[in-house]
Amino acid sequence: MSFRIVGLAEEAFAHLHALSDAELAAHGAERVAIKTPASAPCRISLDDARVGEEVLLVNYLHQSAQTPYRQQGPIFVRGSVERAVFENAIPPALAHRTLSLRGFNAAGGMIEADLVEGAEAGALIERFFDNSDVSYIHAHYARRGCYAALIERV
């Protein structure tokens, strides 16, 4: 079973990078200077921001279905990076973290869920997609529960 892991579109956040800290706060966001390696996984590039880099911490609606599983939460986004697309491969930011994978049906109901070490996620993704009712999968970072990426059936 083929799958694709897709980062968020940079255009959705580009306007925020030019805002002042006060303007960001009015949007419920903040600018963060990265001081520790592997502490800010970017949801656009699907790689970790580097020490010394500034990222935005924003609240993002990642599960918009009008179901009990509707969710939003904090994510890091870098500026001026390309949207990552990984075919049948686990992106760097996901590969070295424990993940919570959640499989959703077309109506936005969660019908599969399990934990996996990121480097081994491919097998669990394939198992979820063996269930024809799974339309898409959301990956979350298990430690903090934050949304990581969308996984699509190819």
Image (cartoon, grey):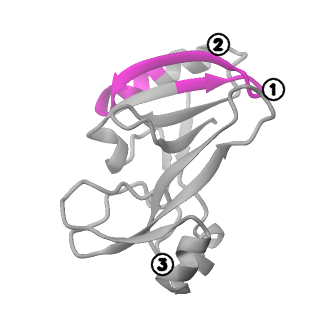
Residue under label 3, please give it. 80
Q: Position of residue 91 (x, y in %)?
A: 38, 47
Location of the N terminus by quadrant is: top right
User: Would residue 66 be found to the left or right of residue 87 on screen?
Assistant: right
Q: Earlier in the sequence, mark 3 or mark 2?
A: 3
**Magenta stretch in the rendered image:** 102-124
Type of residue at label 3? Ser
**Cα gap from disc 2 to disc 1, whole angstroms:** 15 Å
- Residue 77 in picture, x, y percent from top left: 47, 64
Is 35 displayed left or right of 105 in the figure? left
Does dot 3 land on a helix, a strand or a loop? loop
| Horizontal side of residue 109 vs 13, given as left or right | right
Within 10 Å of the Cα at label 1, are there few (<14), some (14-19), or many (20+) other Cα atoms?
Answer: few
Question: Up-down: is 132 above or below 47?
Answer: above
Residue labelled with disc 2: 131
Query: Which of the two marks, 3 or 2, is nearer to us in this view?
Result: 3
Question: Disc 2 residue type?
Answer: Asn
Total marks drawn?
3
